[in-house]
C-alpha cells in the first residue's frame, strides 16, 4: 500500500495497489493521462465505484483496467464493445466505460464500433488515438495519417484514415467529443458529460506514441509530441473561423455532437414492459 | 476604454492585492520515469532536470498550485498540496 500517497490525492484511492507500479506504459506515454482524466470524471460525478465497469480489448490502452479498482474486464482484441454490450444489457444499472486504442476500436473492432453506435448502445467509449498500433511495435492503423511512416509502411502510408468522430456521428452515436492529452482537464469534463448522456457516447482522446510513431516519423520525444498537440489543436469556435484547408490541419476540440433521446436500454426496457403486459393478460 | 482593457486592468489590480496561491510539491521518485513533461511544461519552472534528466523540485517557492503537473504526469508521481494563506507566508 502506498499510504504516503493515498492520503493526499483522489487518484490513489482508485488505483489497485495490489498491481505492479509504476504503470507499464513507456515513460511519457499519454495513456496514463487519459486514465487520470477518467478517474477525475468518475470521482467528480460521485459514482459508486461498484457500479462502474471498465472494459477493454488488447493493446497498450487495453491495459488501463488492470490498474483501477472498478469492475473490470480485459477481453480480446477488438471485442471490448461486444463484451460491454452484453454486460450493459445484463446489468443496465452499471456505468460501462470501454477504453480502446485506435486499432482496437477501428481496425479489428471497427464493425463493433459502428454497430454499437447504430444501436445507440448505452456505453461510454473512450478511444485513445495515438495513430498507430503501439503495443505490437508500430504497424499502421486506420487512423494513421496519409504519407506517415509505420513499420508496415516504411515508405509512407497510402491509406486515408477514418475520421473517428465523423464515423461515430454518422453511425448513430448520441454524444461525440474530442480533446487531447495536453488538454487533460478538458478531457475529464468531456468524459463526465459522455458518461451522463444516454445512448452511445464517444470521446476521442488524441494522444501520441513517441516510441513507435514518433520515432519512425522523427517527431521527437514525449515532450515534443505533447507540444505539438498544444500548438496544433483548436476549439470548435476557433475552427469555425478558419478556412476548410486550414481546419484540415488542426485537431478540433470540443463537443461535436450531443443529442438527447432514448438509448438502446430505454427501448429495450420498453419492450420488456410490453412483453410482460401481453403475457399477463 | 475597450471592455477587454478594463477587464485586464481589473485583473492586474486583483493580482496586486490578492496573494498568489501557493503549493507544496511532492515527487514520488519510485513511480517517476523521468519523461520530462513536468520539467518542460510547469509554467513557473519549479522543476529542473538532474544529471540523468530526472526532475527535482528545484524552486518549490514558485509553485502556484496550478496542478498542471499533477494532471499530466502519466505516472501519478506528483502531488501538490495547496497551502492556505498562513502556510504560504515567508
Ligand atoms: C485477435 C488478435 N489479433 C491481433 C492481436 C495483436 N495485437 C495486439 S495489440 C494490437 C494493436 C494495438 O494497437 P491499438 O489497438 O491501437 O492500441 P495501442 O497499443 O496503440 O494502445 C494487435 C494487432 C491480438 N492480440 N489479437
Ligand atoms: S508503445 Fe506507445 S502507446 Fe504503448 S506505452 Fe509505449 S508510448 Fe504508449
Ligand atoms: S511528468 Fe511524472 S514521470 Fe514525467 S518526469 Fe515528471 S514526475 Fe517524472
Ligand atoms: S502545480 Fe503548477 S506551478 Fe506547481 S509545480 Fe505543478 S505545474 Fe508547476
Image (cartoon, grey):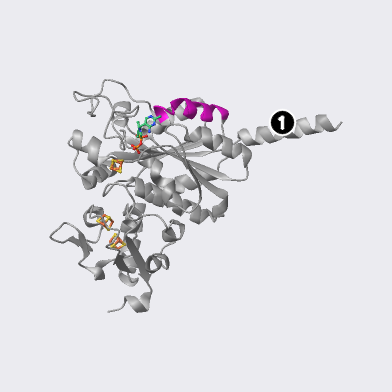
- Give ligand 3's quarter of the image: bottom left
Quadrant in which the C terminus of chain A is drawn: top right
Q: Quadrant of residue B70?
A: bottom left
Q: Chain of mark 1?
A: A
Is residue A47 at least partly visible in the picture? no
Along the viewing direction, whichever of A198 and A215 lies nearer the viewer: A215
Q: Is residue A113 magenta?
A: yes
Q: Quadrant of residue A159?
A: top left
How many dots with numbers? 1
Q: Is residue A228 above or below residue A102?
A: below
Q: Horizontal placement of A272 versus A222: left or right?
A: right
Residue B21's spot in the image, x, y percent?
34, 68
Q: Which residues are magenta?
A: A106-119
Residue extending farthest to the top is A158
Q: Horizontal placement of B6 versus A14: left or right?
A: left
Residue A129's spot in the image, x, y percent?
35, 36
Residue extending farthest to the left is B51
- The residue positioned 32% from the left and 31% from the top of the image is A247
Q: Quadrant of residue A60?
A: top left
Is residue A192 at least partly visible in the picture? yes
- Label 1 sits on residue: A271
- The residue positioned 76% from the left and 30% from the top of the image is A275
Q: Horizontal placement of A30 versus A97: left or right?
A: left
Amino acid at each position: 500500500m502506498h499510504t504516503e500517497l493515498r492520503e493526499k490525492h483522489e487518484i490513489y484511492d482508485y488505483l489497485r495497489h495490489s498491481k505492479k507500479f509504476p504503470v507499464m506504459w513507456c515513460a511519457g506515454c499519454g495513456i496514463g493521462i487519459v486514465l487520470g482524466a477518467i478517474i477525475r470524471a468518475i470521482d467528480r460525478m460521485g459514482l459508486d465505484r461498484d457500479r462502474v465497469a471498465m472494459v477493454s480489448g488488447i493493446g497498450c490502452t487495453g491495459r488501463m483496467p488492470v490498474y483501477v479498482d472498478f469492475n473490470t474486464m480485459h477481453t480480446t482484441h477488438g471485442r471490448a464493445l461486444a463484451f460491454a454490450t452484453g454486460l450493459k444489457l445484463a446489468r443496465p444499472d452499471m456505468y460501462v466505460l470501454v477504453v480502446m486504442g485506435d486499432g482496437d476500436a477501428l481496425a479489428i473492432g471497427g464493425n463493433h464500433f459502428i454497430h454499437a453506435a447504430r444501436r445507440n448502445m448505452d456505453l461510454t467509449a473512450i478511444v485513445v488515438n495515438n495513430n498507430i498500433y503501439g503495443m505490437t511495435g508500430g504497424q499502421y492503423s486506420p487512423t494513421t495519417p496519409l504519407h506517415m511512416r509505420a513499420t508496415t509502411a516504411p515508405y509512407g502510408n497510402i491509406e486515408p484514415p477514418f475520421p473517428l468522430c465523423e464515423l461515430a456521428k454518422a453511425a448513430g452515436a448520441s454524444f461525440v467529443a474530442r480533446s487531447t492529452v495536453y488538454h487533460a482537464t478538458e478531457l475529464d469534463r468531456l468524459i463526465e458529460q459522455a458518461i451522463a448522456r444516454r445512448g452511445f457516447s464517444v470521446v476521442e482522446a488524441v494522444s501520441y506514441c513517441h516510441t513507435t510513431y514518433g520515432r519512425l516519423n522523427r517527431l521527437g520525444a514525449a515532450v515534443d509530441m505533447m507540444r505539438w498537440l498544444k500548438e496544433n489543436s483548436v476549439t470548435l469556435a476557433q475552427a469555425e473561423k478558419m478556412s476548410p484547408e486550414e481546419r484540415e490541419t488542426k485537431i478540433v476540440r470540443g463537443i461535436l455532437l450531443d443529442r438527447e433521446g432514448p438509448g438502446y436500454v430505454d427501448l429495450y426496457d420498453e419492450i420488456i414492459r410490453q412483453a410482460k403486459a401481453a403475457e399477463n393478460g | 476604454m475597450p471592455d477587454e482593457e478594463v477587464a485586464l486592468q481589473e485583473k492586474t489590480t486583483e493580482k496586486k492585492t490578492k496573494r498568489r496561491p501557493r503549493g507544496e510539491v511532492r515527487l514520488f521518485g519510485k513511480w517517476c520515469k523521468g519523461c520530462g513533461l513536468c520539467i518542460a511544461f510547469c509554467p513557473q519552472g519549479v522543476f529542473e532536470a538532474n544529471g540523468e534528466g530526472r526532475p527535482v523540485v528545484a524552486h518549490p517557492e514558485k509553485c502556484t498550485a496550478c496542478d498542471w503537473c499533477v494532471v499530466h504526469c502519466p505516472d501519478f508521481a506528483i502531488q501538490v498540496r495547496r497551502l492556505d494563506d498562513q502556510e504560504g507566508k515567508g
